[in-house]
Amino acid sequence: MFELVWQSALIIFIYATTWYIISLVVKRNDIADIAWGLGYVLLCGFYFISGHNHPRELLIYALITIWGIRLAIYIFGRTMSKKEDFRYLQWRKDWGKTFYWRSFLQVYLLQGFFLLLIISPVMITSYYEQPDLNWLDYLGAIIWLTGFFFETVGDYQMSRFKKDPGNKGRIMQSGLWRFTRHPNYFGEVLLWWGIFLITVNSP
């Protein structure tokens, strides 16, 4: 298991460093948001190549890959059409001469650390031989689908809302946004709980 942990850590270190170099070239740190979901896809690809590929593992890899690619495409479309996100711009100003090494450590490597932490149940599942699928797997998949629906539809509704000039300065209170202030965040949390439930059966 330790070998798989350090291999995963090495992959993410190289991945994060590559995106950091790209950020220096394009002069914007908010591309780290695009890299976030794709990092999970990368590790799932690695586990797929090196694992047992039991139906439980394949289910998890498929769900995370769908989520990661959808998120990256959405954030790419939202990010690259505008200037660098104001939060990253503020860090660029606040950090001054320390900007380069702090960006590497506090944006890219820190993100990589959290990525490894969050995907650890998937890593454990890929390492051990798996028992047959059962009701928890199906419940987890249903919860994941519910979360993915909220996240995807919530993002779509907000995107349409912001494109309407008449909504400038207004708070969205229609669609899924009537029920939860941030359906995309709610969906994000929910789908990861779905992944967790699927991994519960792992030894």
Image: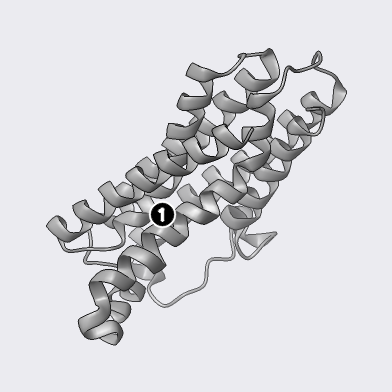
Residue located at (64% from left, 21% from top): 57
| In the depicted structure, whether residue 144 falls above or below residue 90 | above
Identify the residue position indicated by label 1 in the image. 159
Q: Nearer the viewer, residue 180 or 55?
A: 55
Quarter that holds the C terminus: top right
| In the depicted structure, whether residue 87 falls above or below residue 113 | below
Quarter that holds the N terminus: top right
Q: How is the image coloured?
A: one colour
Q: Residues within 10 Å of mark 1 (few under 14, many from 20)?
A: few
Outermost residue on the left side: it is 25
* Image x and y of residue 196, in percent: 73, 39
Residue located at (60% from left, 50% from top): 117
Q: Nearer the viewer, residue 108 or 149?
A: 108
- In the drawing, does residue 165 fall left or right of residue 187? left
Which element is circle 1 on?
Answer: helix
* Image x and y of residue 104, in percent: 32, 63
Query: Image quadrant of residue 81?
Result: bottom left
* Image x and y of residue 135, in percent: 86, 23
- Please, what is the three-letter code of the amino acid marked with disc 1? Ser
Residue located at (56% from left, 39% from top): 5
* Image x and y of residue 121, in percent: 68, 38
| In the depicted structure, whether residue 1 falls above or below residue 163 | above
| In the depicted structure, whether residue 134 falls above or below residue 179 | above
Residue located at (30% from left, 55% from top): 31
